[in-house]
Amino acid sequence: MAMNMVRQGTTARTDQDDRTTMVLMVIAFVLTIGLFFGAGVVLLWDDHPRTGALSCGCGVVVLLLAVLLSRFRMRRRSGNVGQHQPSGSGHCPAGSGEGAVLGGREPTPAAPGMSVPLALPPAVTPAPPAPDYDQPGADAGAVDSPWPDQLAVPARARLLGQPSVAANSPWYLPVVSTQPAVAADQARLGDLEVRAASIIGTGHRSSDPATPRQDAYRLGRDTAGRHLIIAVADGMSDSERSDHGATVAVSTAVAVLRRHLDTGATLRDLSAAEVFREVSGTIVRSLEGRNMTEMDVRTGLIVAVISVLPTRDGHREAWFGHLADLSAWQHSALPGTGWTHLAGDRKNDGMDSNSLSRFLPFSPGDARDTRARIPAGAIVALMSDGVSDALTGIPGANDWFARQWTSPPAVAQFIQQIGFEAKTFTDDRTAVVIWCDPSRPVLARTAGTGWLPR
């Protein structure tokens, strides 16, 4: 009560001072304006039109300044009134014994027999207690996190098949300086929409120190923009620096193919053995001055060139060159079809990835060519075995990938899809997916509903 009376007295004195100041200002402005206008009239009467007009103009300017200043003071006064009003007005401090003060005035007493509800003060969350560093095991650098508890638990990846214990293990760093654990791209070339991602596998990231990501990919195009170029490499797990071999392989392959296309080569002119020989030579030359041998940088490779412009029947010409356990797949988006194999070796044909005998830089002449015609609206995917093994080996994975890739996802969502969780699937994962004519109304399979237009 006493505090409110003091606040009311201070406000009253402030209001009185403001009124006095306003009156003095009004008198000063009236005299000044009258002086300018009076002098202007006299000068005009004495045939001094320019000087008289100037004097009247000064009077108008002073009048405008007076109006602006009065509006400014009114706004400032309104703001001061809001600041003078106590915050939480209408609330009575608990245990004070005083009635609620509304707008600086005492409330009207309630009639006998009527109860007046008292507004409770807002709840105040007590500060967390300081840690007792004298207790055993106390960490002087540990503080309570201000974030919600659920953010402390990492979001789990999509589970395909059986859960993996290693999927929730920490991600460690490798000792060597190498490529990042995750890489991704989103691009468009003509009517081709591309998503690409490469993620280190749980078998490489869960031990300390980690093993570098041994997969790599590159995207490119020819100068004229008529061809999309893709390269995906998978380094051998038992090669100490296969990450270096994979990185050099994809970069060199895209550069070599771009050079051939820019000099007039067609897809029929391309030769996998010729391209892979250049890639192999570059890998060997990159070892000069490095503490590496050719056995340390072994890698598989698949490359592709896809025409941007379709033929009259809507198909696109495509060329693939491949060596080792990388593959290309196609989803035609037609009823009754799923992912079909386009190019590359398939493990279910008897190939064992642990006993590969053909790889770079040792066997470039064993690279194979595959030419294909991609139908309109189809989806093409180039994969390392970290993804293709799941596609063919986990029940339901084929349909799951088809549903996820019905249309091009955002690049962050694509990374999550490649980072699925599955027991025993611990290798690096890389996929480059190309949607041909993604805006065309083609058929897409949905779970439990058959085939619907998208």
Image (spheres, rainbow, N blue to C red):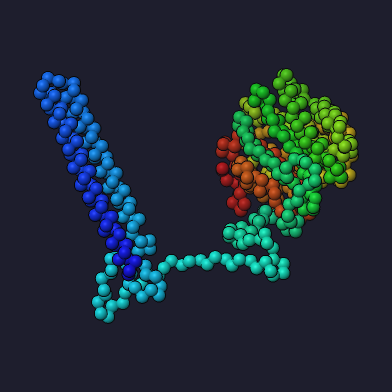
Q: Residue at x 59, y 67 (%)?
A: 129
326 up-or-down from 109: above or below: above
> Vertical placement of 402 versus 423: above or below?
above
Depth check: give the residue in front, 201 or 171.
Answer: 171
**Residue 166: horizontal and vertical position, in percent?**
76, 56
In-front residue for pair 51/276: 51
User: Extreme bottom residue here?
Assistant: 113
Within the image, what quadrant is residue 193 found in?
top right
Identify which residue is drawn at 17% across, 38% down.
31
Q: How many marks?
A: 0
Q: Nearer the viewer, residue 2 or 331?
A: 2
Residue 144 appears left or right of 339: left
Q: Nearer the viewer, residue 120 or 200?
A: 120
Q: Quadrant of the C terminus?
A: top right
Residue 339 in sight here: no
Q: Position of residue 115 (x, y in %)?
A: 31, 77
* Residue that appears at 31% across and 74% down: 116
Q: Position of residue 361 (x, y in %)?
A: 86, 33
Residue lying farthest to the left in this orientation: 45
Residue at 85%, 43% in the rendered image: 240
| 78 on left or right of 288 | left
Q: Position of residue 90 (x, y in %)?
A: 34, 66
